[in-house]
Amino acid sequence: MGDLLSCADSVDRLLMLIGAVAAIGEGLLSPVTMYMLSGAIDSFGSADQSISNGVVNKYALRLLYVGVGIAFCGLLGALLDTRTAERQTSRMRVEYLRSVLRQEVGFFDSEDVSSRTFQIVSSTSTDAHTIQDVVANKVVKFLEFFSLFAFLWELSVSLLLQLPNSLVQFSSLVFGVAVAFFLSWRLALASLPLVISFIIPVLAFGKVMTEIGIRSKDAYGEAGDVVEQAVSNIRNVHSYVAEAKTVDKYSSVLQESTKLGIKQGLMKGYMIGSMGVMFATWAFQAWVGGLLVSQKGENGGRVFIAGTCIILGGISCVTALPNVPYITDASAASKRIFEMINRNTDIDVEDENGKVLAAVKGQIEFRQVHFSYPSRKDEAVFKGLCLKIRPGQKVGLVGGSGSGKSTVISLLERFYDPTKGDILLDGHRIKKLQLKWYRSQFGLVSQAPVLFATSIKENILFGKEDASLEEIIAAARAANAHDFIIEFPQGYDTQVGQLGVQLSGGQKQRIAIARALVRDPRILLLDEATSALDSQSESLVQEAIKQAAQGRTTVLIAHRLSTIRVVDTIMVLESGRVAESGSHDELMEINDQGNPASAFAPALPLSLLSSIQNSSTSSFSAPYGGDEGSNCSSPPDPPHSLLHMNSPEWRRALLGCLGAITFGAVHPINAYCMGALVSDYFETTPSKIKSETRLYCFVFLGLGVATFISNILQHHNFAIMGERLTKRLSIMVLEKILTFEIAWFEKNEISSAAVCSRLSTEANMVRSLVGDRMSLLMQVATNAFLSFALGLVVAWRLAAVLIAIQPLIITSFYLKSVLMKQMSVRAQEAQYEGSQRAMLHRSITAFSSQGKILSLFEATLAGLRAQSLRHSWISGQGSAPRSS
């Protein structure tokens, strides 16, 4: 809890304090309302008509004041709690992103880190497999961190908003019990132990439901594995005509999840039905209350309200219980956020210690460098690498996959540090140089250029934040980018889209070169900068590279002969060492002489093959955030089609509807009986009071039994309908998918993970529609109809007034739900913004752009906070009428 609230400043603490006072006030005023109602009931029961109007006016005015007080407390609490929650979590998001961007690149290569975060992400995000399928491995790890962050942020917001709710419920319980003892201590003392019977069934059945839910999720995971294997190996499935066998296997695996889902529905019926003990408590209170009124001379209104306060106290306990998981989960989960925020990085870009050289010539030297990646510490990439690059020299690195070409650039950029040996710049160990200054001497252009979702000018400014417009244009001219930029209607202010999707590959690459040149680096690092381009774009980019390399030390990872020939020296890397070096002609001459030790000839084709593979991967990868499997969607079937598919369960439907209708009628009947019970307390003869209250004791007991049986009928039968429909629908979809031609599966937007995701999420939606929504709709419709009907029969004038204000209450609940939905959308927006920036961690690190990224992120959050302020007013206005 301390960690979670550590982002609160003095303003937040003040807001939380006032919000807590408002919550306590709201919880206090509800029992005060009950106390006033007891006096009103006693007055109505004993007064004659001649003075009842004065009594009505007195109590109406008092209740009006209390209602205004409750509305004010609800408005103030919702406004302040929402505001401080947004302030604290926004601050937490910025600190989290700041810490992520500070981490060294090697931190995200750690399998321990990846697996630890993925365990949480996989349990909270159904899209984890889809994301993993469309983006590269490093991106997945960044997204895992920010999916974790979104999950923890939602928990944090939930906790900050649920704490006041819990406080309201707790204060309502305490003050309600106090009022009950004040009004009728005998009844309160006798009824209070029964409150425990409200809590025990909820805890017991809730735990069983959670365990079944976990097992059901695992069972659905096994079914998903069957689909994923079938889709991944669709050629084999078609070749061996194994479609029917695959469907049969899928059906048998789904059978287990279907059984668990039905069992979970039965447990849900038991849990909700166990609340029938509340009516048993009413029966006990009616019997004890009748004795107290007839034999002890207690006032009927005080006895009835005392019993009501005990019941409401028990309901407050049950209502507060769902908040406990939020509090415990968020308290534990916040530690994960602050583990990252407080982590000390091994290579800290914000560390200003170190030497700054007066002038840089550009000489690079590797001395006996040993290195292994953090995720593969037992596999050495370099075992004593030695190489030297003179100032202004153009060096090309070639070699097969895994020879260490890109690792050289990563070590030069200090993404990693060698495990042994030294890397020197102009004779100085790079570990002794100030990191931010050191990286400013390099200009990095990668194979897959990464651009940010901002303008072309802003993207170039990532290379040098204080560059003038003249410098930006000069860098663009040097990169052969100026001509196509000025052809855009908005020129340098043109938005490039997320990851530069509005530009072609060649255009993105030339902007990336301009971004590298705007800082006028002494050393240029080109990591297969033309490998993913077509021939036309390649020629333009190569010309830009040729201009950019003039007068600079250049390290170029090459894969094409045309690129190799422009360098001064080629170094052939093999098994983590420089196997050969020399000019292109020298190396070709050695190979032509049939030297068996020559590594140049086979190294170039291997490098080419690796680049082609990378190019294919990048060319056919779906853009991040795309809707995989979008082509497999079809127009939704109307609801009556689903009902027709559920026709084999028509008997279950009748039983479920019977249970829903019965439970929907329970509360209106209970309300009618409570009103009649109050009037019976004011009968003049004790025997009449005893006989009438005894009758209602049996009625309340009957309502308790009806509650238990009807909920079992409702939830068990609708669960059977939903689970069987889900299984039937899933099998039909899989059967249809397996009839598609191979070409459908080879489309770049179709993947096994996408198919599994669609089967899982959409089948769950169908089950929720049939298993929960339909039964709830029937239950609510019955409840509303019978309530309105009984109200109009008993007192039509009063009922008409109360029915008229129902839209106001419904609107208040709607406004509250809109707020929570908007908060969830804002969380997703913040997650997306943060993840997009974090997944470009390597480029941000190379250009030391952490400060600029954080500024952009804070600007995004500022807009979200403005929306939050408006929504907090909506929340407060929604809470006010609902509370009062």
Image (cartoon, rainbow, N blue to C red):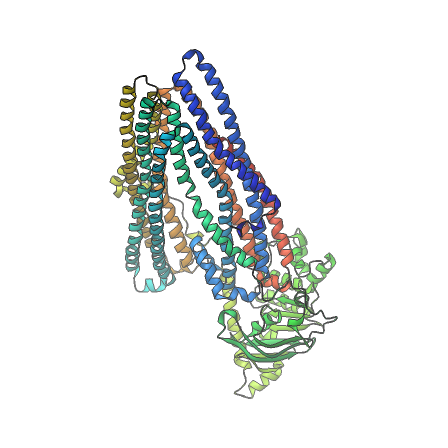
List x then y, in percent, for residue 753: 41, 58
List x then y, in percent, for residue 562: 60, 74
Quadrant of residue 786 in the image?
top left
Quadrant of residue 452 in the image?
bottom right
Residue extending furthest toward the top: 50
Residue positioned 31% across, 36% down in the render: 276
Determine whether, in the image, residue 412 is placed left or right of residue 797.
right
Determine whether, in the image, residue 173 is placed left or right of residue 648.
right
Determine whether, in the image, residue 480 is placed left or right of residue 115.
right
Residue positioned 42% across, 37% down in the render: 316
List x then y, in percent, for residue 820: 49, 42
With respect to residue 662, does 575 lie above or below?
below
Q: How many circles with numbers are drawn on the protein?
A: 0
Residue 269, can we see it?
yes
Residue extending furthest toward the front: 296
With respect to residue 776, does 734 lie above or below?
below
List x then y, in percent, for residue 614: 51, 67
Residue 559, can we see it?
no
- Along the line of sight, the residue nearer the viewer: 52 or 450: 52
- Along the line of sight, the residue nearer the viewer: 250 or 396: 250
With respect to residue 312, does 577 lie above or below?
below
- Along the line of sight, the residue nearer the viewer: 334 or 500: 334
Quadrant of residue 874 in the image?
top right
